[in-house]
Image: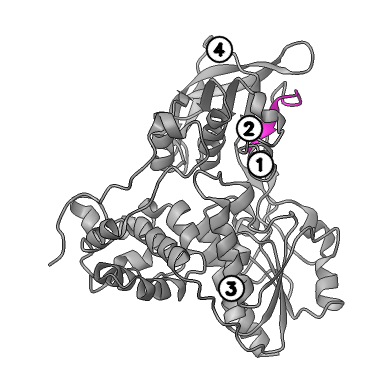
Amino acid sequence: MPNMSLEKIKMPEQAPNVRNANFKEVAMGYTKEMAMEEATRCLNCKHKPCVSGCPVNVRIPEFIAEVAKGDFMAAYKIITSTNALPAVCGRVCPQESQCESKCVRAAKGEAVAIGRLERFVADWYMENCEEKPEKPVSNGKKVAVVGSGPSGLACAGDLAKLGYEVTIFEAFHTAGGVLVYGIPEFRLPKAIVKKEIDTLSAMGVTVMTNMVIGKVLSVDELMNDMGFSAVFIGSGAGLPSFMGIPGEALVGVYSANEYLTRINLMKAYISDYDTPIKNSKAVAVVGGGNVAMDAARCAKRLGAEKVYIVYRRSEKEMPARLEEVHHAKEEGIEFHLLRNPVQILSDGNGKVAGIECQVMELGEPDASGRRSPVPVEGSNYVLDVDTVVMSIGTSPNPLIRSTTKGLETNRKGCLVVNEETNQTTREGIYAGGDAVTGAATVILAMGAGKKAAASIHEYLQQK
């Protein structure tokens, strides 16, 4: 009989006033008993609506049924038949708006905790199994993957299973893309990402770091000189946006990309590393997405006494996950909603001394139905801060498109692809993830990588 409890099994977490001073993982994960109990809440619906909400089509009811029986190895094999990064997805995917939003149990109560169960299974496997996947027999064809973020890793994994000799070219010195430079340790430990990448390496995927495609090598050189039959571009959206307000060139103003990269790859979260941002006393983070929450929560952990989120719309319009907003509030982050920065103030020596904000109110809905913020006259005020982090979006770096002829882009600089195949406007070159969509979620990037892998396979079978 299914467990008809209306609530999910709660996941243990560090207390807010403890975790906001360390970079250890906030959520501690289910125990074996918790996972098995939660799994019995699944009704194993005939039509499996949850699967339709998953961009990589994880066979959700099947793996949950194995968890309920205690056969975690079988559950892991079911998950990884379609998802190459289960420990990552179990932690950072917005399940509440994807698979769990389709769960029948959500009609009366809370959805089955699909993400938590996926994380449990992946963690159980990493802790209990030394088994590595066998390297498939090579089919003699080479494919290059540009970028080792979620899109590139998913594409590489699927192609490796089909026998392709895959080489990933990563610009940074560490593989993982946004998973390692953009997502903080307390949400996604670096060791988890490394283990997932090690699994791909065991399948024969070669990872080359410090390889800036467009500088060290061009896409044309990969295809014409190095013998790659196809190229997948999963280079992400790493070019930050700024507001264009006075003071953005002051010392102490960061893009969220730079701020998080300094913390994650320059290891500001480790006390032995000398990273200047650790000296901030008061920080304003401008923006309302997941990246803004990550930056604000990092600032608190690095010792800032005051951390503010400044967002020009209301909490209802905030694009960040509800869980991230909840955690940020618990950890002492102060929210200044319906507020818009108009200038960053200087101390007279080229450093940040404050941020001037203007109160906003929501006006009439636009064509898309979204209400635009309108300034309130005479409402300006100043927040005393010494650091400002701009987290208002990113776009793809123009390096690859500017060094590769024939790649069409849209007005935002994103690569144009065929929606069915993810092929770009050049034969043999495919793309996916943030390089195509602009900044989006990990799981959507993975779905694009998987689609491109299937298309590349079909293309090369015909050659």
The circle on residue 390 is: 2
Of the residues tagged 3 and 4, which is closer to the observer?
A: 3
Q: From the viewer's perspective, is residue 92 above or below residue 431? A: above
Q: Say whether disc 3 or disc 4 marks the residue closer to the N-terminus.
A: 3
Q: Say whether disc 2 or disc 4 marks the residue closer to the N-terminus.
A: 4
Residues at marks 3 and 1, CA–CA distance in whole angstroms = 28 Å
Residue 452 sits in quarter: bottom right
Residues at marks 3 and 4, CA–CA distance in whole angstroms = 52 Å
Find disc 3 in the rendering and name its residue.
Answer: 157
For label 3, the crowd category at 10 Å Cα-Cα, with few meaning under 14, some 14 to 19 and many 20 or more, is many
Of the residues tagged 1 and 4, which is closer to the observer?
A: 1
Q: What amino acid does circle 2 point to?
A: Met
Residues at marks 1 and 4, CA–CA distance in whole angstroms = 37 Å
In the rendered structure, the answer to whether residue 106 lies left or right of residue 55 reads left
Find disc 1 in the rendering and name its residue.
Answer: 267
x, y percent for residue 221: 85, 71
Q: Which residues are magenta?
A: 248-256
Q: From the viewer's perspective, is residue 10 above or below residue 385? A: below
Q: Which SS class for mark 1?
A: loop
x, y percent for residue 32: 30, 60
Residue 93 sits in quarter: bottom left
For the point 29% across and 72% down, which residue is it?
66
Residues at marks 1 and 2, CA–CA distance in whole angstroms = 20 Å
Q: From the viewer's perspective, is residue 27 above or below residue 102? A: above
Find disc 4 in the rendering and name its residue.
Answer: 380
For label 4, the crowd category at 10 Å Cα-Cα, with few meaning under 14, some 14 to 19 and many 20 or more, is some
Q: What amino acid does circle 3 point to?
A: Gly
Residues at marks 3 and 2, CA–CA distance in whole angstroms = 34 Å
Query: Looking at the image, do the residues carrying marks 3 and 2 touch, with CB atoms under 8 Å apart?
Result: no
Residues at marks 2 and 4, CA–CA distance in whole angstroms = 19 Å
Q: Say whether disc 3 or disc 1 marks the residue closer to the N-terminus.
A: 3
Q: What amino acid does circle 1 point to?
A: Lys
